Image (cartoon, helix red, strand yellow):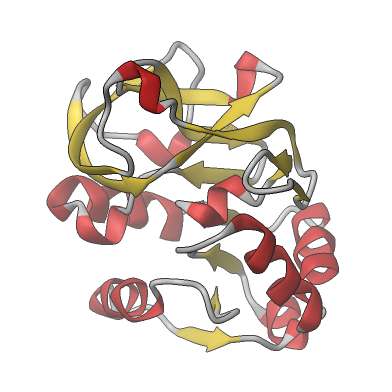
Amino acid sequence: MIAIIDYGMGNIHSVQKVINSFAQKFVVTDNARDLGKADKIILPGVGAFADAIEELKKRDLSMAIIEQIKLKKPFLGICLGMQLLFNRSREGSGAEGLGLIAGEVDRFSPARGLKIPHIGWNQVNQTANPCRLLHGIAAGSYVYFCHSFYALPQDCGVVAATTDYGINFTSVVCKDNIFGVQFHPEKSQSVGLRILDNFINLC
């Protein structure tokens, strides 16, 4: 069973619809006990970092997520859900994340002349670091983004793909059983479906 975490800030309906199309058993939940029953966990996310962490804590989900990841369950963070995996964010006055991947989250600089948020289709350029999530994904494939912040991992070894938007920012991370994508696979047509299918079929 796949647990899709609902903490009031995720694009739950779109993710749920895609997982359902794969005929997979799933539950949309804000109950920490359901995570213990799941084989895999997905954390979607849209909104502010600090608010998201607060909502996870209110539901006793932050510690439950960490516990289940320590049990080696495959975990996928999407957009804000990926950013929450890091130590902290520079958004607003700053907030502490889940601390599962070392690094910070920063905002795109408007001084670069970029439109913020970064919205629309852009390429993912795979690094030399192997990642099962990207199996069968062609080099330079396009996926759909909608974000103003991006992750800055301390260890380049967890970076599985980058994307160019004024800077080369991290768009996919892989660390053991932890996976994160800055884009929205549920909105990225065939490429996104393949990525989600890869996650579903992880052993």
Residue 44 at x, y percent in the picture: 48, 64
Tell which of 150 and 110 is nearer to you: 110
Q: Residue furthest front?
A: 111
Residue 1 appears in the rendering: no
Tell which of 117 and 85 is nearer to you: 117
Tell which of 56 and 95 is nearer to you: 95
In the rendered structure, the answer to whether residue 165 lies left or right of residue 81 reads left
The quadrant of the image that shows the N terminus is bottom right
Q: For residue 48, which quarter of the picture?
A: bottom right
In the rendered structure, the answer to whether residue 79 lies left or right of residue 124 reads right
Residue 71 at x, y percent in the picture: 81, 58
Question: What is the count of numbered marks?
Answer: 0
From this view, report whether residue 85 is shown above or below residue 107.
Answer: below
In the rendered structure, the answer to whether residue 91 lies left or right of residue 101 reads left
Q: Which residue is at 68% across, 33% downward?
A: 104
Q: Which residue is at 73% across, 47% downward?
A: 93
Residue 85 at x, y percent in the picture: 67, 47
Q: For residue 112, which quarter of the picture?
A: top left
Q: Which residue is at 32% across, 53% downward?
A: 184
Residue 59 at x, y percent in the picture: 76, 83
In the rendered structure, the answer to whether residue 118 lies left or right of residue 132 reads left
From this view, report whether residue 71 is shown above or below residue 198.
Answer: below
Residue 32 appears in the rendering: yes
Q: Which residue is at 51% across, 74% downward?
A: 9
